[in-house]
Image (cartoon, rainbow, N blue to C red):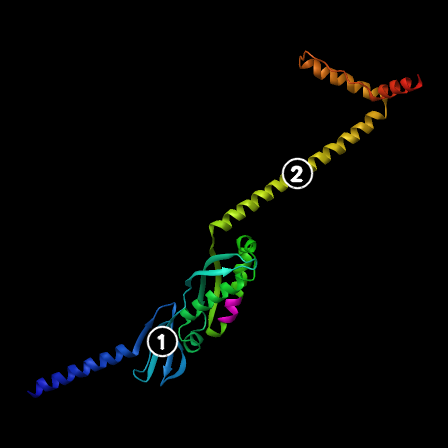
């Protein structure tokens, strides 16, 4: 009986030792860090790899250092020109200081999410709708800078911010389409007017060159007749010199 009693004690002792070792030995992956608390007080950061902690006396909080992707829900935003839009974004961030991420904030994931939503509304509300559609890169950088500065006390680094969608209601889409069409018509009229102006300037230059020598005008008449003749038209119109008309008018007045 004594042998069985000693054997049972040995088995219990071995189980206790194994349980002690299991709770004392921690294996951390390359992207993990352990925030160690000794009797409730912060005592350091350990890892990655094999670490040893004192059971009951020390507690460990694992922190993942990989980049996290946070999908910001769609937010109702009123732009500076009083246009109501729905905007959502995605944020990439990671923990760079496990101590701050564990001690300074209760849940850094939720805190970053809530801060991202308020920052998104605040930044976009200061810009016009055209800026939201055309200046996304600048808006992304502005939001990233604000988030990065505010989450620095939590040990978080915001790596990138991307605005995904800017949803506009149907009436505003039609208004934007009409605006774009009007802009295209305006540009077409301006281009047409510039073309007329350039043509008028060239015609004025040509007239000045031809008027410098009467023979040049006669050669131009002959060139025009040659062009008309090559097209095999049945009717030929001869240009009537304006100088001859002035002479005839002068003769009629003298009579």
Q: Of 226 and 179, which appears nearest the observer? A: 179
Residue 197: x and y, percent?
73, 36
| Residue highlighted by disc 2 | 191
Q: Of 41 and 201, which appears nearest the observer? A: 201
Residue 225: x and y, percent?
74, 15
* Image-based side of 233 in relation to 207, left or right: left
Q: Of 84 and 93, which appears nearest the observer? A: 84
Quadrant for the C terminus in the image: top right
Residue 2: x and y, percent?
8, 88
| Residue highlighted by disc 1 | 61
Quadrant in the picture for residue 65 = bottom left
User: Magenta segment range?
Assistant: 146-151
Instruction: Using a 10 Å C-alpha cutoff, classify the residue at mark 2 as few (fewer than 14 neighbours), some (14 to 19) or many (20 or more).
Output: few
Residue located 82% across and 25% down the image: 210
Residue located 8% across and 84% down the image: 4
User: Where 112 sits versus 215, above or below?
Assistant: below
Tell me the mark number nearer the camera, choosing from 1 and 2. Answer: 2
Could you tell me how far apart the alpha carbons at marks 1 and 2 are, in whole angstroms?
Answer: 68 Å
User: Where 220 sits versus 147, above or below?
Assistant: above
Q: Residue furthest top?
A: 234
């Amino acid at each position: 009986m004594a042998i069985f009693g000693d054997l049972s004690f040995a088995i219990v002792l071995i189980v206790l030792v194994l349980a002690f070792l299991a709770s004392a030995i921690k294996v951390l992956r390359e992207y993990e860090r352990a925030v160690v608390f000794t009797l409730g007080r912060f005592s350091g950061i350990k890892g990655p790899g094999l670490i040893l902690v004192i059971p009951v006396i020390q507690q460990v909080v694992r922190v993942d250092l990989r980049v996290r992707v946070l999908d910001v829900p769609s937010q109702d935003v009123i732009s500076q020109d009083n246009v109501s839009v729905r905007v959502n974004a995605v944020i990439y961030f990671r923990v760079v200081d496990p101590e701050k991420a564990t001690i300074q904030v209760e849940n850094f994931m939720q805190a970053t999410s809530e801060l991202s939503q308020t920052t998104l509304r605040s930044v976009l509300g200061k810009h016009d709708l055209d800026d939201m559609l055309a200046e996304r890169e600048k808006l992304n950088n502005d939001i990233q800078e604000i988030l990065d500065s505010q989450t620095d006390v939590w040990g978080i680094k915001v790596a990138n911010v991307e605005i995904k969608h800017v949803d506009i209601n149907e009436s505003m889409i039609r208004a934007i389409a009409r605006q774009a069409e009007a802009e295209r018509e305006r540009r077409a009229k301006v281009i047409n007017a510039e073309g007329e102006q350039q043509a008028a300037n060239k015609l004025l230059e040509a007239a000045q060159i031809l008027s410098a020598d009467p023979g040049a005008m006669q050669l131009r008449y002959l060139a025009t007749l040659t062009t008309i003749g090559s097209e095999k038209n049945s009717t030929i119109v001869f240009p009537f010199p304006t100088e001859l008309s002035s002479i005839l008018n002068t003769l009629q007045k003298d009579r």
